[in-house]
């Protein structure tokens, strides 16, 4: 889940308390993906964008004292204060973004160059994640997945991912088999003992992913 979702505003928690805590996502995010290629044609980084749902956005803005006149417009000072609002990640948090070259998992850097705005009733942030080593999608398909393992946050890839710096590549977005994912969720719920037990990491079953392939030079 996004860093901000780890400490959900109290009002949101209370509003959702009637739902089985682990059975439904509480935050909904439209994610955008931009693959940044270097001059040598290899992928160097991902720029990830998150647009939060209206309820979460409003709750966060209200409970943190932004927009006191409720006109939906933040001052320049408030916008500056908002920057990096969701980048306070716990140690080891993978950022709900996962990348693979074929079947090989790829390392990603901590977030860099964060931005954030509040407009049209929604919070939108972006951040850059660098690959631990350059990736050539001509050798193995580059796969980018967005999901929260705990399923507290639900991610949807919004629009077609953008490729910056290399021509001729193709991008496809794949949705999960939701019937199969729901079946896995139901099985997890039946096994879940509650109380202090940790809910099974079911989020990957609902992962959407982008697949990028490039022709050989």
Image (cartoon, helix red, strand yellow):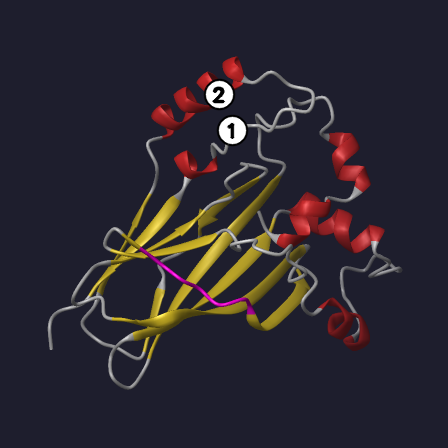
How far is mark 1 from mark 2, CA to CA?
Answer: 6 Å
Q: Using the image as rendered, state which of residue 96 and residue 208 is in the foreground.
A: 96
Question: Which residue lies most toward the top here?
Answer: 190
Label 2 crowd bin: few (<14), some (14–19), many (20+), radius 10 Å: some
Rendered residue at 54%/66% (across/down): 110
Residue 191 higher or lower than 82, as above or below: above
Q: Which mark is residue 192?
A: none
Relative placement, left or right, of 23 versus 7 is: left
Residue 50 higher or lower than 134, as above or below: above
Q: Which residue is mark 1?
A: 200
The mark nearer the N terminus, 1 or 2, is 2
Q: Are marks 1 and 2 in contact (CB under 8 Å)?
A: yes
Task: Label 2, secondary structure: give it.
Answer: helix
Q: Which residue is mark 2?
A: 188
Rendered residue at 69%/43% (across/down): 55
Rendered residue at 36%/61% (across/down): 161
Relative placement, left or right, of 71 versus 133 is: right
Residues shaded magenta: 105-111
**Residue 144, horizontal then vertical, whole percent:** 36, 55
Please tell me whether residue 120 belongs to the stretch shown in magenta. Answer: no
Residue 57 higher or lower than 176, as above or below: below
Q: Quadrant of residue 208?
A: top left
Majority secondary structure of magenta residues: loop
**Residue 163, horizontal then vertical, whole percent:** 32, 70
Task: Label 1, secondary structure: give it.
Answer: loop
Q: Using the image as rendered, state which of residue 72 and residue 93 is in the foreground.
A: 93
């Amino acid at each position: 889940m996004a860093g901000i979702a780890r400490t959900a505003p109290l009002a949101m928690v209370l509003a959702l308390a009637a739902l089985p805590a682990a059975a439904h996502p509480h935050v909904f995010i439209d994610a955008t993906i931009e693959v940044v290629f270097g001059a040598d044609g290899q992928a160097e980084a991902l720029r990830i964008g998150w647009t939060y749902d209206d309820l979460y956005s409003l709750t966060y803005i209200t409970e943190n004292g932004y927009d006191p006149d409720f006109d939906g417009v933040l001052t320049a000072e408030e916008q500056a204060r908002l920057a990096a609002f969701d980048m306070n990640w716990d140690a080891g948090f993978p950022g709900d973004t996962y990348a693979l070259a074929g079947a090989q998992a790829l390392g990603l850097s901590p977030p860099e160059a964060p931005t954030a705005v509040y407009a049209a009733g929604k919070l939108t942030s972006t951040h850059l994640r660098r690959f631990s080593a350059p990736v050539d999608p001509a050798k193995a398909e580059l796969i980018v997945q967005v999901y929260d393992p705990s399923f507290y946050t639900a991610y949807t890839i919004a629009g077609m991912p953008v490729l910056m710096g290399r021509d001729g590549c193709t991008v496809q977005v794949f949705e999960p088999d939701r019937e199969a994912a729901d079946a896995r969720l139901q099985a997890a719920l039946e096994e879940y003992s509650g109380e202090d037990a940790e809910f099974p990491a079911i989020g990957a079953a609902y992962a959407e992913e982008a697949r990028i392939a490039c022709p050989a030079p």
